[in-house]
Amino acid sequence: MTNPSNRHNWLLSLIAVLLTIPLSSCSTMNAVPPEVNLMRLDVQDVTMSHVNLLADLRVFNPNEKALTIQGVDYTLHLEGIKVFAGKSNLSQSIAPQEYGHLTLRLSSAYWDIIQLFNKLPNKSDVSFSMAGSIRVGGSRLFAQRFSFTKQGLIPLQKTTQ
């Protein structure tokens, strides 16, 4: 027969453990969203159906505590056409007020690139928008997701020099 005081102690211990798990990730609950910038795109390989790139992202942690990046997903639109999309589940910690660098693998179908090239003749600038989200937290279960977007123009005359 089980002792009632042992059962009571066991139940209190279980409750304490269950409360500790969500509270351990509270430091990310009040986190300021990190700043994400695209720094470079490099062609990785070309297959029969897709073009694959590596995108280098620079992530700034504006918080007073380190952030653990649990993953990033990302899309890049050029001239309104979704040209590249990708994701990374690599985990990385970024110290407070510091920059970190992430590399994402992006992929695009040839059809999207053909649509883009049809829009480019006689253009001096290409409009871009990038959007995605970044998962931050000490554990994947309680990670917080921050969305990011950037828009602008890429001058074509500078890319050809």
Image: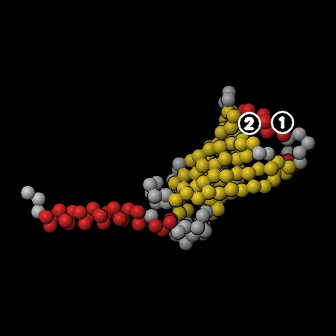
Q: Amino acid at mark 1?
A: Asn
Check disc 1 and report the residue beneath it: 118
Check disc 2 and report the residue beneath it: 112
Q: Residue at left 55%, top 72%? A: 64
Q: Residues within 10 Å of mark 1 (few under 14, many from 20)?
A: few
Residue 100 marker = none
Q: Residue at left 50%, top 65%? A: 28
Label 1, label 2: how many angstroms apart (C-alpha)? 10 Å
Q: Residues within 10 Å of mark 2 (few under 14, many from 20)?
A: some
Position of 151 relative to 4 (above/below): above
Mark 1 or mark 2, which has the lower sequence index?
A: 2
Residue situated furthest right in the rendering:
122
Give the percent coordinates (x, y) of residue 95.
55, 66
Give the percent coordinates (x, y) of residue 126.
82, 48
Q: Residue at left 72%, top 56%? A: 150
Give the percent coordinates (x, y) of residue 130.
70, 51
Residue 99 visible in rendering: no
Label 1 secondary element: helix
Q: Residue at left 27%, top 62%? A: 14
Residue 80 visible in rendering: yes
Give the position of the N terminus as an image quadrant: bottom left
- The reply, left or right, for residue 95 in relation to residue 19 is right
Label 2 secondary element: helix
Position of 86 relative to 12 (above/below): above
73 or 100, which lies in front? 73
